[in-house]
Amino acid sequence: MPRSLPPHMYFVVSAVFHYLGPAFAVLLFARVEALGVAWLRIASAAVVFASWRRPWRQWRCLDRPMRLLLVGWAAVLAVMNSAFYLALERLPLGTVAAIEFLPVIVLAALAARTGRNLLALVAAVAGVYLLTDVRLVADPLGIAFAAVNAVLFAGYIVLGHRVSRGAAVPGIDGLALSMLLAAAIALPIGIAEAVPAFTSLVTLAAAVGVGICSSVIPYVADQLAMARLPRATYALMVALLPATATVIGIVVLTQIPSPKEVVGVVLVVAGVAAHRPGKAGSGG
């Protein structure tokens, strides 16, 4: 992935592949339980990163604080992906997406120190609300898993931003190390439910597709974007995810949005367009 692109373009790549991954996961959900899907996603991504970056060569050169940062990020990745799929088993995707967005918007709000940025934030939140049609669902366990995923997604942004700005290890190599560690952390959680996948080449191929589309391409794009965008700007741009899902639905699935959803897309895009980042190092 070329590093010369504008940082916002890396986020667009991440947003698009963020929704291609679940298309592969549909096949896996029919054959593998949620925690198995989560581990297969992480493990297949770890194999790709190991083959591509050989990140273990970096580990011995890192100091203790950086190692702890990477281990913490790995734990977040492992539990976040597991909670995400457990929530999707019980709740509509739109509800999970809405809950996931709430802590992220707090990150953007913490740095929205101008009237323009606060208005941008309000527009983005209103647009996400219209797109996801937030509603209460009578499944407290599903809500709990979605809340865990949401908090950890905000943690993913914070820790990923620190890794992307660190000088000790290149961001992508740091991601590769954390993904390998995440596969080990999630192993006892998901390996039992992942076993059925190893009896079918089609299922394994789908698992590789999920790993590449959901944890390799978008996470690499995230690192390239985070290295050049303030954390608050990146957090606000996450509001584009529901809008991206709507566009993909139109193009790929011919799912025509309702007038309310069209208004939601317009508000999200307007909010992101109106936001003005501070200095390059702010929000980090």
Image (spheres, rainbow, N blue to C red):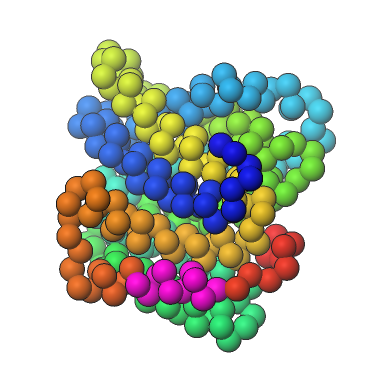
To which quarter of the image does residue 201 belong? top left
Q: Which residue is depicted at the point 23% across and 31% down?
A: 27
| Magenta region includes residue 179 | no
Compared with 26, 249 (above or below) is below
Observer able to see residue 143: no
How many dots with numbers?
0
- On the image, the x and y values in percent for residue 19 come to 35, 46
Q: Which of 254 and 201 is in front in this view?
A: 254
Quadrant showing the N terminus: top right
Using the image, determine if residue 150 lies above or below residue 49.
below
* Residue 135 vs residue 8, the one in the foreground: 8
Q: Residue at x 40, y 57 (%)?
A: 241
Q: Where is residue 225 shown, x and y percent of the image?
A: 59, 51
At a point 30% along the width and 56% down the height, the residue shown is: 247
In which image quadrant can residue 284 be found? bottom right
In this view of the protein, which residue sits in the foreground, 227 or 139? Answer: 227
Q: Magenta stretch: dominant SS?
A: helix
Q: Give the range drawn in magenta.
A: 266-275
Left or right: 9 with respect to 208?
right
Residue 135 appears left or right of 118 = left
Residue displayed at 50% across by 62% down: 237
Seen as rendered, the residue at the extreme bottom is 115
